[in-house]
Image: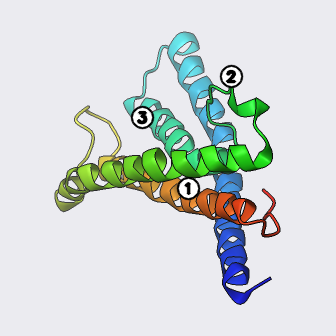
Amino acid sequence: MKSGWIVLHKVVAGIDQLTEKTGQLISWFNLLLVLSVCLVVLLRYFLNVGSIALQETAMYFHALIFLGASGYTLKHQEHVRVDVFYRRLSPKGQALVNSMGTLFLLIPVCLFIGFMSWEYVMQSWSIMETSTDPGGLPAVFLLKSLILFLAFTLFLQGIAELLRSLMLLADVQEVQHG
């Protein structure tokens, strides 16, 4: 294998490893989400106690899971796909579809989301935005930052998927999803 392909292999492996570690870390927030929702329900319906902060905590966990694990979901090919024709294609045909989809859909959408949300997120940081609800969490700026986290992690994993597809199309030993 030529040195350029070796470098691409290492780039893909590095991005995959980062995505995998990020996804594994974020997966623990599912437990925290379930616990926080159960606590909200128990407090409200059995003790007649409400907590805006606890409700917002559950919302933050949900946002972190959904937005933060998108790259991980892409890596494991678990995103929704209409594969009426895709599943019948050869591995090279699938790699071609994946590379075109990544180049013309995924990467532009990630760049658009990042570009369009940058000022929105920075404005929130500039005022250290807090919840508008009394007793809410003082970290709305962190919640809004997850939009940029989504764009970055999905873009990064998209690059790995694109490179993986290009290596398959070039008959270079495929980098396995880990």
Disc 2/disc 1 C-alpha distance (Å): 22 Å
Residue 146 visible to the viewer:
no
Name the kind of residue labelled 2 in the image.
Val
Q: Residue at x 53, y 62 (%)?
A: 156
Q: Residues within 10 Å of mark 1 (few under 14, many from 20)?
A: many
Three-letter code for the amino acid on which mark 1 is drawn: Gly
Disc 2, SS: loop
Label 2 or label 3, whichever lies nearer to me, is 2
| Residue 84, x across and y down, in percent | 68, 22
Q: Quadrant of residue 9?
A: bottom right
The residue wearing badge 3 is: 56
Is the N terminus in the top left, top right, bottom left or bottom right quadrant? bottom right
Q: In the rendered image, which residue does mark 2 sit on?
A: 84
Q: Which mark is residue 158?
A: 1
Sequence-wise, which precedes: disc 2 or disc 3? 3
Position of 37 relative to 125 (above/below): above
